[in-house]
Image (cartoon, helix red, strand yellow):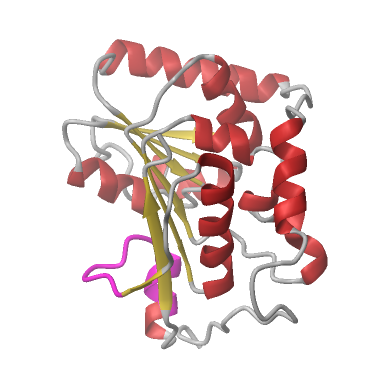
Amino acid sequence: MYANSRIPQSAQSGIHEQLATLLDRHAGAPFRKPCADYNRTAFAASMARRAALAPTAPLILDAGCGVGESSIALARLFPDHYVIGVDQSASRLARRIDGKDAGTLPDNLDLVRADLVDYWRLLRAADVRLARHYLLYPNPWPKIGHLARRWHGHAVFPDLLALGGVLECRSNWRIYVEEFCFAVERLRGCPVRCEDWLPETPLTPFERKYLDSGHPLYRAVVDPG
């Protein structure tokens, strides 16, 4: 029953017809929802840890890191960088922080429990710049009416892009990555394309499960400047 994932099903056959309008609206109206206090506390604590451990190291953000497997892999792949993995689920993060990997996590890694919407905005407000930024298999929200829940359709997307660095998005739903490319190009003027993706080593549990289920995978990589 392990390799039985389904490819996202949607009535969409291409890029959502309302995406351009939604992007223009978000670009013209800054997202002003107040950040929650617990996210401010988590952000401040993570920045303090970074300042104490690796204040000059380039920063990598693993956004929506889940159980942290991808964050660990990135910290080992980029030992001269400082990696922050952020996820809103305390239970998922605890599998690494308090589980079998406790005491063996890379020194250049920090796993943070916070809501990404606030964490992204707090990074931007603090003028923090990223070297690399990963969106690995985010919830695709494939229903037509859920466009604004996809990261590229969310009001926070302009803040996400403003953090800079090499931005990589992966998904098992081609339309998601195609929409991501469209959104980056519309807001930042950076040409980017969706490409087929076949990793030598899966970076996340979802990537492993999708491969084992026979899914085609897609990704886009861009430096939005």
Point out residue 50 in the picture as x, y percentages from the top left corner: 35, 18
Q: Residue sitting at 24 percent across and 68 percent down?
A: 201
Task: Give the left or right position of residue 146, taking residue 223 as reference.
Answer: right
Instruction: Inspect this view and state whether residue 54 appears.
Output: yes
Q: Which residues are magenta?
A: 198-210
Task: Give the left or right position of residue 164, taking residue 12 as reference.
Answer: left
| 50 w.r.t. 203: above or below | above
Residue 99 is covered by the magenta coloring = no
Q: Residue sitting at 60 percent across and 45 percent down?
A: 89
Image quadrant of residue 98?
Answer: top left
Point out residue 9 in the picture as x, y percentages from the top left corner: 67, 82
Point out residue 109 in the picture as x, y percentages from the top left corner: 31, 34
The one of 211 and 124 positioned closer to us in this rendering: 124
Q: Residue sitting at 43 percent across and 40 percent down?
A: 224
Q: Residue sitting at 73 percent across and 38 percent down?
A: 26
The one of 161 and 208 positioned closer to us in this rendering: 161
